[in-house]
């Protein structure tokens, strides 16, 4: 798939992943609504397979492969949810997945990938080492590389979450997702704007990793330089496939402070009784900080994942 | 309501509370199923109003009152979820709720009751002081006392959770709930056995607060003496209304160790991405400890609540 995905591609992705992915619930909370003065609809991808929306894109990519392509397996470099998602999707199709991971990755991430049967190859913790190691894997195996976000198959897969959200709650004024590499935000924007052109799409980013905010402002891709945020799923820069989509379809990128991200995460745990990771608290954090006009609106928010180290909660750190 | 509730009473309660209570979802988890070798269906009362099933019983009791009774308000002594539940139910009916609470109750519990508009009267932290203070409130106000569990209106209300669970998943072999005072287990047993006589009802209790286990064994009410468990919702003894119901309708009371309760709570957080309080991890804990025969069975479990102090997680204590 070498062209920008359309709503039709997202619908095809939804059909392709339906046997494997959860149709996640949309939850609401009167307490959270009251806190911000709007009506919020949370699409709970923290309940998705592997605990994150990433399974949608990885699954769509893996099941889009021809038999011939699939035989050689898939590969990526990632130490996050995409790694686990690709390993599980490959396992479900019965093909191999090779994951290049920095040797410094947390044990919990290594265990997740290994648990889904992924083959891990360790490298030095630099982007150069990751890319070189992945290239060597591909040279040896002819595996299909599935990039975590700069891949149209992945973007179409991620768009299925917004497709489900818009189907469940048709009258949304605004749809929000966090933005890291931009795969989710791109897919969300395509689905949302195709189904309801008047609905605004807003991306939310940590102020400490605001490359999307700066890229939109500058009108050109500004890479992330030494990002620093607790939202560890949002450290990456936009890609050359996601940036133009975001530029043309997203109304606004808003940023949240670290304190607001932690407060938003804690409020969600306390009031909604669900576990979300810091990255996915960012949209609600921007509402707490009133970073744009949304009073009284119906706002859909994609909760991206729930993979948290329960021994290290942000509000308990020194 | 002075007679033992029937299925009809539980259906009436369901209709009565429907405008106010959440119809909570039933969630499943492949990971948890694999851990114990059975199919588990979790009725998520942690998502209920005030974060606990207690709202069902309190709401049914409050909305069962005649206009004349209601005018005098309601009262109870409790420092737990029932206090908040009664305060909210009274607020929804527009009547007053007086809650007698030991002066030593945690601030978070006081704030919850006050937040729902309940009037708090503090007393010394002894059962005698609680009962005397409540009697004085009633003498002054003629308020209707709504006991946390030893009250048929409350039992009928709690039974609505099992009614919804059995409707959502009709082929359950076993239905489990925790047992403290026995209100939930009694209501659950009436609903379950009426709808499906062959389904077994099993109560789960902390080994450190096993008065129900000992009462059933002895064939007579054995009160809780110095119970010690992290499951702080399950410290109370059975009542004279709940004990006979449990004796006649519940197949078995099983107990869980403290370590298993903490492990069960943590597994649920990690795998299901939902927040449950220690008391409601007890049924799953007994499965982890394989306390009875259940392999391959379909088991419904009522998750009773999600009110946890996020600053003091059991696995992070010294």
Image (cartoon, coloured by chain):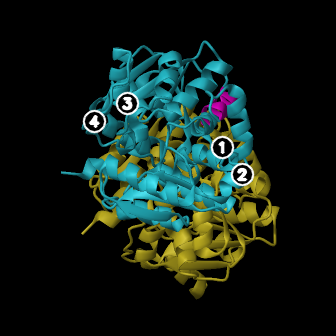
Chain colours: A cyan, B yellow
Whole-angstrom CA distance, mark 4 to mark 1, is 35 Å
Considering every residue shown, the one lying at the far front of the view is A139
Tag 4 and tag 3 share a subunit: yes
At horizontal 43% and vertical 57% (from top left) the residue drawn is: A100
Q: Are marks 4 and 2 in contact (CB under 8 Å)?
A: no
Q: Position of residue B56 (x, y in %)?
A: 60, 48
Whole-angstrom CA distance, mark 2 to mark 3, is 40 Å
Q: Secondary structure at mark 2?
A: helix
Q: Nearer the viewer, residue B300 or B250?
A: B300
Q: Chain of mark 1?
A: B
Q: Chain of mark 2?
A: B
Q: Are marks 2 and 1 in contact (CB under 8 Å)?
A: yes
User: What numbered label is drawn on residue A258?
Assistant: 4
What is the span of residues highlighted in magenta in the rendered image? A161-169
Tag 2 and tag 1 share a subunit: yes
Q: Secondary structure at mark 3?
A: strand
* Residue A164 forms part of the magenta stretch: yes
Whole-angstrom CA distance, mark 2 to mark 1, is 8 Å
Q: Which residue matches tag 2?
A: B164
Tag 4 and tag 1 share a subunit: no
Q: Nearer the viewer, residue B159 or A233?
A: A233
Q: Secondary structure at mark 1?
A: loop
Q: Which residue matches tag 3?
A: A205
Q: Quadrant of the C terminus of chain B?
A: bottom left
Q: Position of residue A1 (x, y in %)?
A: 65, 36
């Amino acid at each position: 798939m070498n062209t920008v995905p359309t709503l039709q591609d997202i619908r095809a992705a939804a059909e392709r992943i339906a046997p494997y992915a959860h149709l996640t619930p949309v939850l609401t909370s009167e307490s959270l609504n009251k806190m911000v003065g709007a009506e919020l609809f949370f699409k709970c991808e923290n309940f998705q397979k592997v605990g994150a929306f990433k399974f949608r894109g990885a699954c769509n990519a893996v099941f889009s492969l021809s038999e011939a392509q699939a035989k050689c397996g898939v590969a990526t470099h990632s130490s996050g949810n995409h790694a686990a998602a690709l390993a599980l999707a490959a396992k479900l199709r019965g093909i191999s997945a090779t994951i290049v991971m920095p040797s410094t990755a947390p044990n919990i991430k290594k265990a997740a990938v290994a648990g889904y049967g992924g083959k891990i190859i360790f490298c030095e913790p630099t982007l150069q080492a990751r890319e070189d190691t992945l290239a060597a894997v591909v040279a040896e195996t002819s595996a299909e590389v599935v990039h975590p976000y700069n891949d149209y198959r992945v973007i179409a897969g991620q768009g299925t979450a917004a497709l489900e959200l818009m189907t469940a709650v048709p009258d949304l004024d605004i749809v929000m997702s966090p933005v890291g590499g931009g795969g989710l935000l791109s897919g969300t924007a395509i689905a949302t704007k195709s189904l309801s052109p008047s609905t605004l799409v807003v991306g939310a980013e940590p102020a400490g990793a605001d490359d999307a905010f700066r890229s939109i402002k500058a009108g050109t891709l500004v890479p992330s330089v030494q990002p620093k945020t607790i939202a560890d799923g949002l450290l990456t820069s936009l890609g050359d496939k996601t940036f133009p989509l975001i530029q043309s379809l997203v109304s606004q990128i808003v940023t949240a402070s670290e304190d607001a991200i932690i407060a938003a995460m804690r409020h969600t745990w306390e009031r909604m009784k669900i576990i979300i990771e810091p990255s996915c608290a960012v949209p609600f954090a921007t509402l707490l900080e009133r970073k744009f006009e949304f009073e009284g609106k119906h706002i859909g928010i994609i909760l991206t994942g729930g993979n948290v180290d329960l021994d290290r909660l942000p509000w308990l750190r020194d």
